[in-house]
Amino acid sequence: MDGYLGIIVIVAVIAVLAVGGMFLLFRPSRRHAPPVRPPEAPIAPERERVVPPGVTEDDTVTTTVPPPARPAEPVAPPKPEIEVPPPSAGRLVRLRARLARSQTSLGKGLLELLSRDRLDDDAWDEIEDTLITADVGVAPTRAMVDELRTRVKVLGSRDHAEVRGLLREQLLAQIGTDLDRTLHTAPHGERPAVLLVVGVNGTGKTTTTGKLARALIGDGRTVLLGAADTFRAAAADQLQTWGERVGAEVVRKDEGADPASVAFDAVSKGMAEKVDTVIIDTAGRLHTKTGLMDELGKVKRVIEKKATVDEVLLVLDATTGQNGMRQAQVFAEAVNVTGIVLTKLDGTAKGGIVISVQRELGVPVKLVGLGEGPDDLAPFDPEAFVDALLGD
């Protein structure tokens, strides 16, 4: 019995060991942790394939396209440097050489004729023709010839100095040394002087306005400009350029604006800023257009609601001769012209227009233009003018 139990125990132990071995043999395997991936490399910028000239598609070169550049900030244009003009005093003396053409035809021509030993009727006819050709005018010419003939008979024999003195005296008498040629540009207390510049197209009116502003600033005045020529945008731009060069402010409006309103605003601003002188440039008027002349009168009336117009300067082209005289007469009827500005006097043999225009209008020549330079506008000096015509 005991032997039988022992056999049973042994069999049980073997069975247990067999089951355990089978468990160890077929148990599920342990899972391994996932492998650690290396950090990803940074993404390179996208590249563009570029095919240079002469390279095939297979030989393309890879290049990096840079990001677009930021647009540069706009740079404001530099302001023009403010110029310091020279004073106007003595300009006509300095510019006397510019009168060479008038000197040759009027001054030297008359001196040669009057210096002849014998002055017969033919010689006096030549003297008269010379004066008329120089635009002295018929009536002043006859007056001069009559006086010269009388004086020559009294003198008898004459040398060059006596003839020159005689002719100088007669020219000065016709030009007039007693006329008031003062340009009224000084302020009246709190109110600036107001100058109105008028004239037909092509006489150099806008340029004269700019040169006048420059001359006044050279004399120590403060100036404001009014661009009342609203029919031409170029006129306002031109005046703006003149003003910027010398530091003078310009009042302007859009093309086609009412000229009278521009003039009124300019005078108002001049009073507010206490400038010495306000200069108004008006549109070039065709003297045959009655409506335009009426408008010019309106500009003057509107200004006078705010201030007194101290000067009305009529700009005439000296090369136009007697045609300029007709223009002057029409303007004198439309506005009260106080002074004449003769431009282009350096380019004409008609220097005698100084005499005829004053005689016809009873208005003095106050300024003369003797070139295209910025400082070629000069106060008119009768003695310097006649001396320039006659030469040394």
Image (cartoon, grey):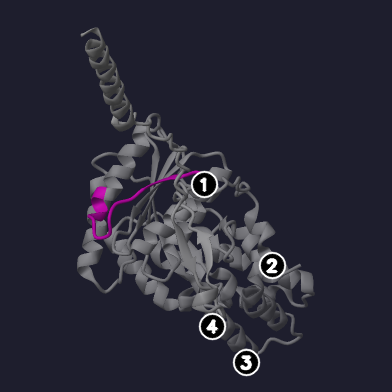
Report the side of 37 relative to 305 (left or right): right
Q: Is residue 307 left or right of residue 38?
A: left
Tell me, for residue 122, which label it has, or none: 3
User: Toward the viewer: 198 or 169?
Assistant: 198
Task: Give the magenta-colored segment's residue range.
Answer: 246-261
**Which residue was labeled with disc 4?**
133
Q: Amino acid at mark 3?
A: Asp
Question: Label 1: which residue?
Answer: 79
SS state under label 4: helix
Residue kind at label 1, given as amino acid type = Lys
Q: Nearer the viewer, residue 165 or 26?
A: 26
Q: Residue at x 24, y 49 (%)?
A: 261
Categorize mark 4 by other alpha carbons within 10 Å: few (<14), some (14-19), many (20+): some
The label on residue 181 is none
* Real-space CA distance between mark 2 and mark 1, rounded to the nearest whole angstrom: 35 Å
Mark with earlier residue (2, 1): 1
